[in-house]
Image (cartoon, rainbow, N blue to C red):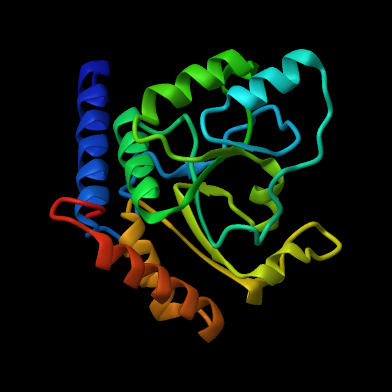
């Protein structure tokens, strides 16, 4: 049996490999033991969109109820993550999401508290990316693994009886990959309508990219 030190060393190597894969956009699936994982159980608040989670904290501390600010289909590029992922990877994906105009989505609160969620997000969201706490989107787009990347059209807002969006209205891919590679994969594999959305987003971010960006 491997020792605790050997297990820890292996985990660190896998995390570094995952981060390098995201930065260069060269991987398609997570290595065994890497951070790609089932979505952990977490409290599931009503969805609320905010740049830095301050609005979410204030709303729940004051006890005010508010309808979800974001429905499936309102944004065509979503990056689903979890705080169970390595901080370095979350920081890199948040940076890429900012450059790509994507929204980073988490399912619920870290450690069951808003304050812990806010601190954790601030630590990895140095780019100032828009983050969203929205459990309904996980169900709508059948997200069970993180990280997952979703491109959706407007019709994805019309969910089926089970709360899931029609599969023809969106496409998703998961794994230790960059946002650019995720978009390129969806562009090549999705139905024509979704592929066009992915291709248009790719053209936009590539035309605006500077050396070192996204990849």
Q: Position of residue 2 (x, y in %)?
A: 24, 24
Q: Is residue 117 above or below residue 66?
A: above
Q: Quadrant of residue 114?
A: top right
Q: Is residue 133 left or right of residue 187?
A: right
What residue sits 15% from the left and 50% below the top?
A: 212
Q: Is residue 74 above or below residue 80?
A: below
What residue sits 68% from the left and 57% below the top?
A: 72
Q: Is residue 85 above or below residue 143?
A: above
Q: Is residue 165 left or right of residue 17?
A: right
Q: Position of residue 113 (x, y in %)?
A: 63, 16
Q: Quadrant of residue 65?
A: top right
What residue sits 25% from the left and 42% below the top?
A: 19
What residue sits 53% from the left and 76% below the top?
A: 194
> For the C terminus, which image quadrant?
bottom left
Residue sitting farthest toward the front:
208
Q: Is residue 57 left or right of residue 163?
A: left
Tally of marks: 0
Q: Is residue 63 left or right of residue 30?
A: right
> For the N terminus, which image quadrant?
top left
Q: Position of residue 75 (x, y in %)?
A: 58, 58
Residue sitting farthest toward the bottom:
192
- The foreground one among 70 and 33 is 70
Q: Position of residue 12 (x, y in %)?
A: 23, 29
């Amino acid at each position: 049996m491997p020792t605790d030190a050997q297990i820890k060393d292996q985990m660190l190597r896998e995390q570094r490999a995952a981060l390098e894969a995201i930065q260069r956009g060269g991987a398609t699936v997570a290595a065994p033991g890497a951070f790609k994982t089932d979505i952990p159980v977490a409290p599931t608040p009503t969805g609320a969109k905010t740049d830095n989670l301050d609005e979410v904290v204030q709303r729940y501390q004051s006890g005010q109820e508010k309808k979800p600010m974001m429905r499936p289909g309102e944004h065509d590029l979503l990056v689903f993550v979890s705080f169970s992922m390595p901080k370095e990877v979350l920081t890199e994906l948040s940076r890429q999401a900012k450059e790509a105009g994507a929204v980073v989505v988490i399912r619920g609160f870290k450690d069951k508290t808003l304050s812990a969620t806010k601190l954790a997000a601030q630590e990895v969201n140095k780019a100032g990316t828009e983050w969203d706490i929205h459990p309904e989107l996980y169900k709508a787009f059948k997200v069970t693994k993180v990280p997952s990347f979703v491109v959706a059209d407007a019709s994805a807002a019309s969910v089926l009886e089970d709360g899931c969006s029609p599969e023809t209205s969106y496409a998703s891919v998961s794994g230790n990959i960059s946002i650019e590679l995720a978009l390129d994969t969806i562009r090549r594999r999705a139905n024509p309508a979704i592929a066009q959305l992915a291709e248009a987003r790719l053209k936009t971010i590539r035309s605006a990219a500077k050396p070192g960006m996204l990849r």
